[in-house]
Image: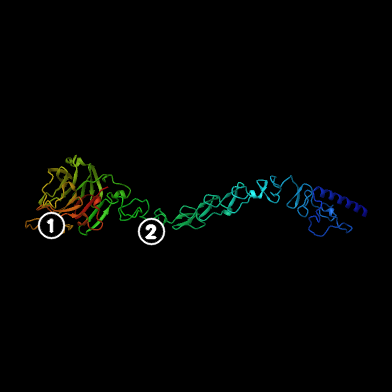
Amino acid sequence: MARLRTATRTARSARALWISLAAGLVGCTGVEPVSVSDRPSRDATGDSASPSDVFSSDAGDGGASCGEESQPCCVGSVCSGALVCEVTTCRAQPTCGADAQPCCVGSSCRSGFVCTAGTCRPATACGRLSQACCSGACESGLRCISDRCEACGAVMQACCGGGACGASLACVADRCQPCGGAGQPCCGSACSAGTECTAGVCRGVDRDMDGSPAGVDCDDADPRRTPGRRELCDGVDNNCNMIADDDNACGLWVHTAATGVWAAFALDAMAEMGAPSPNAPTTEIRFALDIESLSIAYVFTDTTFHVLDVRTRRWTASGARDTLIAQLSGRTTLGAYTVPAGHAGANANLEGGAILTTTGVLSVEFNISMRRWTFSMESPVPTDWMPPANAPMYSRIRAGWLDLNNAEGWASFSPMSLCTTTATRVGPYAGVIAGSNVHFFEAGHCNRFGPPVPFASFAPFSRPGSPPLSRLATTFFNNGQLVVLGTR
C-alpha cells in the first residue's frame, strides 16, 4: 500500500512538471497553491508534498487544487496553460491585455495599458481632453462622455462628477447654467439681491404686488410706479423714467382764485381708466368759449367741437365745428373769450363771445335756454390798440380770457391807472397771451393795455404747478377758475 501511494505521488509530480513547463513557469520557485493555511501539504505518511504538486491534488489528499480551469488561481494569480486569473478563479481566455488586444476579463489590461472601449491602449493616449477615457476615467476638470474626455463645469457644458459646476453656475439637466439671477436656477439656495429662491428658481420679490419684482421695479413700495407703465397725470413718476407726468399725461390745468393753487388733470379723465371718451378731442385744440351759467365750455379744433363739463372735467358731446358756427368755415383762429350773460345789464339769457381769426373778429352769442350759437357780426382785425407799446401783436396771440373783477390779482399795478378818467369802477379785465408774454387789458372802460410781463413771472403762472408755456393751447375763465387746456 505504501508503494502504491509513492507511485501515485510520483505520477502527479510528473504531470505538474509538464504543465509548469507548458506555462513557461520553469524556474519559478516557491509556488504554492492558494490555501487558507500557510503550512505545506503532507501526504498520509507525513512527508511534505513536493513542489510539483502545486497545480493539483486528489480529493482527500489534504492538498489544495489550483491553476486548472474553474479552480482557484495559484499564489501570484497564476493559472496553467492559456488560462487567466479572473478575480481568484482560472478561466479560459483568448489572447488579451496587450496593446490593441481585447481587454481581459474584468476590463483589465497589462501594466501600462488601459481598457478603452473594450480594447487595451497605452495609458498615455487616454484621459486627456478629447482623448478616449481611461477605463471610464479622465483627468481633473474633464468628464467621460461617450468614451471621450470632454471639458465640464463651465457655462452650458456638461456638469462634472457629482453635478459640480463653476462659480455662479448650477447643474440643471446635466448642464451648467447661470444661477442666482431673476428667473435663473438658485445657486444652491442662494439668489441675487431683490430675488428669493422659490421651488429652485430665483424669483423677484414683488412687495407692492404690481407685477414688477424688486430687482426690476424702481420703487417696490409703491404700486403706482412700474417700468413700462402708462404715465398718469398724478404727480408720480409712473413709468420709472425719473420724470413725473411726462408724455403729455396732463392736459388740463385749473387755477382757483380763492386759493391760488393749481391742479393738473388728464385731458380725458376716462382715458386714464382705460376707456377713452368718444367725445374728447383727438387733434390740436385751437380755442374755447365757456358758458359760465352752465359751467360748460365749447372747445374747438380745426374741424370739430367738444363740450366739456367744467365741474367734472368730462366730455359730454362733440360734432363738426362748422355745423355749430357756420362762419368758422375756412377760418384760421388765434383765440377767443366770452362775456358772462347779464353783464352790465345785458340779456341774462345770452352769453357773448369773440373769436379772433386771422381775417377778422367774429362776434357770437349763445342762447342759454335753447343751447344754440348765433353769429352776430364780424369786425376787422384791430389795429388801434392803445397804447401801442404795450399792445400785443395780433398775429402772435395764442390765448385769452376775461375776468370780471381781477380776482386772480394778476396786475402788479392798479388797473384803474390805465384809464385817464376818474371813473370809480373799471373792468372787466382780460389776459392776452401773445408770444412768450402776457398782456393785461382793461376791457370795459378805456380798453387799454398794461405793460407786458413774461409768462413765467405773470401771476398766476408764476405759482407752483402751473402749466408750461409750451403746453398751452387755450384758456378760459369760469366761475372763479382759470382753466388751461394743453397741446397734445
In the displayed structure, 361 sits above or below 200; it is above
Disc 2 element = loop
Q: Position of residue 42 (x, y in %)?
A: 86, 58
- Please name the residue that numbered disc 2 is placed on: 221
Q: Residue 224 falls in which quadrant of the image?
A: bottom left
Q: Position of residue 58 (x, y in %)?
A: 84, 52
Near-viewer residue (383 or 291): 383
Quadrant that contains the N terminus: bottom right
On residue 415, the disc is 1
How busy is the neighbourhood of tag 2: few (under 14 within 10 Å), some, or many (20 plus)?
Answer: some
Residue 199 shows in this picture: no
First along the sequence among labels 2 and 1: 2
Q: Amino acid at mark 2?
A: Ala
Count the numbered circles shown.
2
Near-viewer residue (461 or 118): 118
**Furthest residue toward left:** 422
Q: Position of residue 396 (x, y in %)?
A: 18, 47
